[in-house]
Image: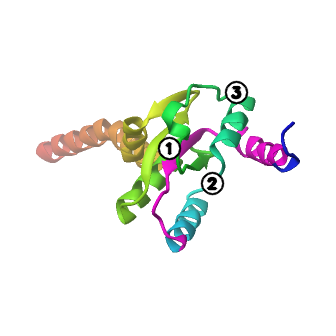
Amino acid sequence: MPAQYKVDEVKKLVSKLKDAKAVVFVDYKGISVNEDTELRRIARNSNVEYFVAKNRLIQIALKEVGMDADYGTLLEGTTSFVVGYEDGVAPSKTVYEYSKKINKLEIKGGYVDGGLVDKAMIEALAKLPTREELLAQVAYGLLSPVRMLAVALTNVAEQKN
């Protein structure tokens, strides 16, 4: 029979993970308390949640919310978690950028869009432009032909005058 505090902890983890779009697993070994606190602040500002939990308890919680996979070595050693609720890319960006800054965090992998992904995929997601940047690129691409037509028509009108 599991201890009550473990059951309560799994319930807390399930409530955190049930609406998650992405979960990034991070090896936090070697970071200081100040760096950890700064990462938590950055995570809050990015609308993601950063926390540490026991590997076995998080594995049980992941299974309960339907994120069942073979996590293998992802849940070994010191592991912290970055969870994104609104944006599936935000956790990857947050951890990747901070890990470049302090050079101590090691991205292990993650669970994104219903599947387990490796470190390379998390880093690729982190390097993608933000949603706003992508929308701006699409808008620019859509307006470019219209702009070219306007320039051409202006040149034709100037030549006729």
Label 3 Cα crowd, 10 Å radius (few <14 / some 14-19 / many 20+): few
Is 20 included in the stretch rendered in magenta?
yes
Tell me if residue 19 can be seen: no
Is label 2 or label 3 in front?
2
Residue 15, placed above or below residue 31: above
Q: Which residue is mark 2?
A: 52
Q: Amino acid at mark 2?
A: Val
Mark toward the start of the polypeptide (3 vs 1): 3
Q: Amino acid at mark 3?
A: Gly
Badge 3 marks a residue whose secondary structure is: loop
- Between 40 and 106, which is closer to the camera in this rendering? 106
Measure the alpha-carbon separation of dots 3 and 1: 20 Å
User: Which of the 4 image quadrants contains residue 10?
Assistant: top right
Tell me if residue 76 can be seen: yes
Q: Which residue is mark 1?
A: 89
User: Which of the 4 image quadrants contains residue 150?
Assistant: top left
Badge 1 marks a residue whose secondary structure is: loop
Q: Which residue is mark 3?
A: 66
Mark toward the start of the polypeptide (2 vs 3): 2
State the image coordinates of residue 74 (x, y, percent, origin top left). 51, 38
Residue at left 14%, top 42%? 160
Magenta region: 6-33
Measure the alpha-carbon separation of dots 2 and 1: 20 Å
